[in-house]
Structures are given as structure tokens and as C-alpha cells.
Amino acid sequence: MSARADRPAARPARSVPSCHSEATAWVGTEDAPVVALVGSPNVGKSTLYNAVTGLRRDVGNWPGTTVAVGRGVLRLPSGDAALLDLPGAYSLDPLSPDEELTRALLVDQAADERPDVVVVTASAANLSRGLYLLAQLRETDTRLVLVVTMSDIAARRGLSVDVAALAATVGVPVLAIDPRRGEGVQGLADVVDRVLHDRRPTPRTTCGGHDPLVVADDRFTWISTAVDASVRRAAVGRTTWSDRFDRVVTAPFSGAAFFLAVMWAVFQLTTTVAAPLQEALDALVTGPISAAATWLLDAVGLGDTWVTGLVVDGLIAGVGMLLTFVPLMAIMFALLSLLEDSGYMARAAVVTDRLMRRIGLPGRAFLPLVVGFGCNVPAISGTRVLPDARHRLLTALLVPFTSCTARLTVYVLVATTFFGSNAGTVVFAMYVLSIVLVVLVGLAMRSTLLRAMGDTPLVLDLPPYQLPLPRLIWASTWSRLQGFLRTASGIIVATVVVVWALSATPAPSAQGSFGDVPVQDSVYASVAQTVAPVFDPAGFGEWETASALMVGFVAKEAVISSWAQTYAIAEPADASEPGSLGDALIVSFEESSGGDPIPAVLAFLVFLLAYTPCVATLAAQKREIGTRWTVFGVGMQLVLAWTLAVAVFQVGRLL
Amino acid sequence: MRLGDVPPGGYALLEAPDVPTAMARRLAELGLRAGERVQVMHRTAGGGRLLAVGDTRIAVDRQTARAIPVRPGDADAADPSEAGPS
């Protein structure tokens, strides 16, 4: 950010570590002016940001925090400016880490590090709400622009805002923009450019001195004056259709029923509808694409070499795995966007608030946790519905304990093999245990690591209902999908390649050459043999099982194929008909448990449920909560899974 | 009398809430401040209330509804959207 001499003395940063160089690097422009977009939640701030920046944007965590900030380029007549999309905030008096960051960047940090222009967004349908933040910023020498959005919704309520009168009262330029339809967006750059080259405004003085309540009253009076001068209202009916709809979707019984129906639809779309698309992509990659690559390598004389293995079983398999997540993630992101844009998400939060509060999470956390039972990867991304970064962190750490459908295949195979007609009960018990783990781990983390997380009561401004615009949903889905692919591609492809390389390398004592060695003679098998004794106290210390669990770290879908490979048995086409793989497993668990296979199998299932779901989940976690918390999560899952498995086996064999 | 005691459809005049200062400030920012007239629209799932404050609708949970003392509001005082700018 550019340094200026005409700024007041620097105040020390309070809530956010001063990380000028890091933050400057993140903003990405050393000399360009910085424009920040602020506003209360649900006023179309991010839609405005998307409309202004197009696809030239990026969303990431502000350095040193888990708070997501968008950054992009605002093209001004005098050159490019960096545009920051700060988290939603009602005021500069923070109640959440997101609001703390907004305050820190706008007010607390050194004057020459603050944004050069701040664009405040306010809804025409509820002007006074948005003006509080403006009132506070007017008490500083910040260069300001006020953008009034949602004029269409205001018009439906019989309200209109006189922009010129408003500008005259509040003393800053005001623009009416409809970012959803792109109307008036062009004018923003011109106004920001003009303000950028103006003198800094003289701060408004308030009466009340140091008494915060008197100062707040002074601001409310100032806001009332501005609203009286600019808002025209026609007579409107008392109860709108929106009120009638709210009565259904937030009321005790009908609200819960409507919510469950919506969750059912979300779950169906992220599982049943996504599955054939995923299978088709998988078939394309493992079929024609792999065949074409093999043919091409044959043609250049690399046919039977390790290069084919690296390309087909490493790189293409890795990219294929990444691609199978694309339809799933696209559906998830589109649904998130639809639920948020329509205004329903806030109603859902009201309905589930009391239930979720019991495990210290707000109502909105219900959505990612439900989706987690389909697939953990989109569920982790779904934590974005939570406005508070601490809630996002806790939910993202809990999602891996929701039992995804990939784990279900393994449950079915193992339960059918060992429990016959009682298999259904065992699988059901795994789902119950999954819910119990989410609740208990949530409570444990609330009372230890995240103890400082406040228990803010639910006071929620319900945004007006809006008809979702397909163009906006597409833009948001595409942008989030790109972000996911950027973060996940490296991790997923690298992991698949490493597993391939380990299983292609012969162990020091074994025969064979690189790329031409049976899996049981590979370095991968040696590693599994080294790891296996760790599972002895849990009753499943055979290297074949350890090997399957290691592959399961990459993807749970691979557990069964790994077993089949190591026992040199064809993989069963249907998990409920385990065939000779089932026989091999019975012998294996019989041996490893010292004659108590049932407790050992239950211990194995518990371990499978509780340990790291897959590398794609880790990639999604890294994107949402950062590397440090992701590593912490892996450690926590492994320790918990092992402890529970040992407890199940040791107690089970005594019974 | 507390906000939670107001029957659905009823009006109330808010008094200073019994909540920590930061929360009181947030309630005020959302339009729930002493002297403001609100209509209780209905009871929400979980025992909270949906309130009409001016032109906006605000959901509060049961605890918050219990923490805000009120005086009975006048149903004839006009529509909440005309009770003042909000």
C-alpha cells in the first residue's frame, strides 16, 4: 500500500498481528491504491465485488487468520487498484473474528496501511442498518463512497431512496447500484477514482465524549436525519407474502419439516445425482484416456517400462481422482449459492439453532454436517455458510467424523463377511457412532481448545427473499470450483503418485525391478509391515490390513481393491457378496486377533470410521482452515481412531 | 413483562435489554433499542421469536427474547413500518 505523509499518527494494531509485508504480498500490489468493500451481511456486497472484478479475483485467508478475504482488481481511469472484499460487518464494534479483521484493517492498523478508499454497501430496503458502519467511518478521515443496493426489493416494499438527498446529508458520494443485474456498476470506478484524488474528509465529531452509549445514540440520530431526508415510502400492507412464507419455514413444526425436506434434496443431489457423473468421469479416465496414454507410450517405445506405470497409474489416476470430485463439488457449490442467494439459509439457521447450540455450533453448521454423510469434501467447503471463522474451524474439524458413502462400501463388505444377516444392524451402528463422535468431539473441543469461542445468542437479520439468478449461481460456482481445483490438484495428484512410486519400487530384499514388482515385494508392503504392529493391540495387525488402511488415507474407495490386490484375489463386483475375499479376511482377522475376530473386526470398523477420510478432504481442509489446523485434525483423528479401536478390541475380547 | 411474553401478533415497546454491553450494541445496530416499537410476528422453532422491526424481520432466540424487558405497545399506533425510519 502506498505510504502517505498526510495521515494521522499510527495506532497499534489490536486484533490482527501487524503483517504489513505479508499482507502487502497477499494484496499483491506494492504501489497500487487499495479499495476496500465493506457492509453488513446480505446486502449484496460480494455480488458487487464479483460484478466489479469479473473472474479476475481470488479468495483466500488473510495472512495470520482464518478469515476469508476476497481480492481482485478494480480498473480505475487513473490505473488499477487492488479491491478487497472484507467480511460482512454490522459495525466497527466486533462480535466475531471476521468483524475483528474488518475493524483491524479499517481502523486499528497503522494509517499508511489502511485502505485508500472504503466503499460501504447498504441496502435500500433497510438503509439505516447499513448507515451505522458509515457513521462510524465518517468519524475517521477515511475516504468513503456509499453504494445503495437492493433498490428493487425496496420498491416492492414501497420504499425509494433519493440518492442526491442522501449524499448531501451524509457528506459522501452515493451511488445506486444493482450488482445482481450489473446495473450502475460502471459508475463505481469513476466515483472511486475521483474520491481517491480528493482531499481526505474532515472527520465528523460526535457528542457524548467517551460514553459509548451516548456516542451510539448520536450516530442513530445522525442516521435518522439521513433516512428522513432521503427515504420515501408509499403505504404498504402489513403482512407480505414473505411474512406468510416465513411463518411456514421458521415455525416450530412446519419449519423443521421444510428444513428436513431441503436437507434431503441437498443430500440426494450430492450423492444420487452426482454418483453417475462421477462414475462416468472415472470410467473415461480409467478406460479410453488410460488406454490412449498406454498406446501412445507403446508407440514411442516406452510400452513396458516404469514410465507407463508413472503416467497411467500415477499421474492419470491422480488427475482422474481429482476429476471425479468436479461434478460433486460443482453441485455442492451451486446449492450453497442457491440457498444463500435465495435468503433461505438464514431461515434454516433459525430452525436448527437450538439443536446445534447444544454442541456449541450455530444452526447453519447443520448443512455441512449433513452433506458430510454423502462426501466430506464438499462438506468442508460447505462450512463457508458459517459467518464466524471459529465456527468454520470447529465444523471443518468435525466433518471428517461424519461417515461418508465411501466408508459405507467397506462397512458393507466387512459386515456381510463377519455378521451375515446382522450386517444391517452393524452398519446402522456405525452411523449412530458417527453422530456420537461428532457430538462428543465437538463438546470436547469446545471445552478445551476452542474454549474462548463465545456463545453469541441468535439475533439474526432475515434477508429479503430473492429469486436466484442462474448467472450469479454459475459465476459463484465456477469461482469456488477453480479455487478447489487449484488447492486440491497438487495434493491429490502428488499423493497418488507417491503411493504408486512406493508400490513400484522393489523392497531391498526382494527380486524385481522398478515398475515391475508384485505389490507384496514392494517398498509399500515393507512400510505396511512396519506399520502393522501398531494395530496389534486393536486386533488387526496383519500387514495386508495395514496396507489397506494406508491406501484408505488416499481414498476409502481403494480399501477393498487394496485388500484384493494384496491377497491376490479378484475384487468383488458387489460389496455385499464378498466371495473369496471374504474368506481371506476371515482367516486374516482370526489370526491377527488371536481367536477373537469379532471384537477385532468391530475395532477395525471403528478405526475406519474415525481416521482421516481421504486426501481430498485434507486438501479441502487446507483450503478452508489452513495447513496447521489440517495437520492438527489428522493427528486428532489418528489418535482418537487408534484409542477407540484398541478400547473396542480389548473390552470386546473380555466379554 | 418480557419480549418473550408478548403474544404472537402483539406489539411491544422495548426497554434497555439485560445483556452484556457488546450484545446490547449489536441489538441496537439491528434496530432493537430502547423506545423502539416492534411487532412479534410468531414463535420460531426452538422457542425464539420473529420480530418485525420497521421494514425488517429479525429472529431472536428464546434467551434473548427473555432478556429484553418491554411495555405493551399500542396496536393502533400504526404499522411498524411507519413507526420510524429503520
Image (cartoon, rainbow, N blue to C red):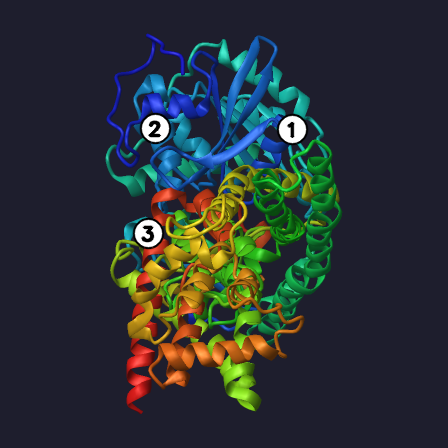
Subunit ID for the residue under disc 1: A
**Residues behind callouts 1 and 3 on a single chain:** yes
Amino acid bearing label 1:
Gly
Q: Is residue A241 above or below residue A304?
A: below
Please tell me which residue lies in front, A414 or A110.
Answer: A414
Q: Position of residue A35 (x, y in %)?
A: 49, 22
- Residue B83 in percent (x, y) is at 54, 51
- Would you say A24 lies left or right of A380 here? left
Query: In the drawing, does residue A16 fall left or right of residue A184?
Result: left
Say whether marks 1 and 3 touch (CB < 8 Å): no
| In the foreground, B20 or A359 | A359
Tell me, for residue A632, which label it has, or none. 3
> CB atoms at circles 3 and 2 under 8 Å apart?
no
- Circle 3 sits in a helix, a strand or a loop, which is it? helix
Residue at 58% in and 56% down: A345
- Return the residue found at the far front: A511
Numbered label attached to residue A107? 2
- Regarding residue B8, the answer to whether it shows in the image is no
The residue pinned by badge 1 equals A54
Judged by depth in the image, the label closer to the viewer, 2 or 1, is 1
Under mark 3, the amino acid is: Phe
Percent coordinates x, y for residue A60 in the rendering:
47, 36
Q: Earlier in the sequence, mark 1 or mark 3?
A: 1
| Other residues around mark 3 within 10 Å, as few (<14) / some (14–19) / many (≥20) | few
Picture layout, residue B9 above or below residue A125 = below
The three-letter amino acid code for the residue at tag 2 is: Val
Q: Residues within 10 Å of mark 1 (few under 14, many from 20)?
A: some
